[in-house]
Amino acid sequence: MENELRSELCKRILATLRHRRAEPGRHVPESAFASLGTSRGPIRSALEELARGGVLEHRPNRGYFVLDILAAATDALEPGREEQIYRSIGDDRLDGGLGETATVS
């Protein structure tokens, strides 16, 4: 159950970071995710998991910082989570957050 909660929180944190278009270097305070309806422990665990995946960097006594939210689209993903990314992209497109064409560099 704990792994399921951590996995779900990772998904929701990533979605929030993408929605806010978090740039590399941006501070990601634990308190920013208080609205997810869980205590700080599971949120901290999810942030640690994202740090292990190369999405965030943990700086002792300072917190977490964005490294590369696109890393979640490769090595940091569990099998099957790619579909959620495609759905998120589709949602962004439908909401007007993405243009008709996009390029990857």
Image: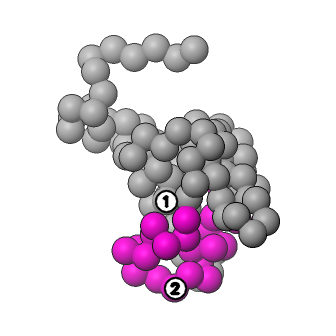
The dot on residue 91 is none
Determine whether, in the image, residue 38 is placed left or right of residue 55. Answer: left
In the rendered structure, find residue 39 and report the number of the disc placed on it.
2
At 64% from the left edge and 52% from the top edge, which residue is drawn?
65
Mark 2 element type:
loop
User: Magenta part of the protein: which range?
Assistant: 29-50
Please determine whether, in this image, residue 39 is positioned above or below residue 89.
below
Q: Is residue 74 above or below residue 34?
A: above
- Residue 49 picture location, percent across and down: 69, 62
**Hey, which quadrant is residue 59 in on the image?**
bottom right
Residue at x 30% of width, y 27% of height: 98
State yes or no: discs 2 and 1 in contact (Cβ < 8 Å). no
Find out whether residue 38 is within the magenta segment: yes
Q: Main secondary structure of the magenta part?
A: helix
Q: Residue at x 27, y 33 (%)?
A: 97
Q: Is residue 7 visible?
A: no
Relative to the observer, which residue lies in front, 76 or 80? 76
Q: Secondary structure at mark 1?
A: helix
Q: Is residue 35 magenta?
A: yes
Q: Residue 72: x percent and y percent?
A: 60, 44
Q: Residue farthest to the front?
A: 61
Quarter placement of the N terminus? bottom right
According to the picture, the residue beneath numbered tag 1 turns out to be 13
Look at the picture and state if 97 lies above or below 103: below
Q: Residues within 10 Å of mark 2 (few under 14, many from 20)?
A: few
Q: Which amino acid, by three-letter code, is at mark 2?
A: Ser
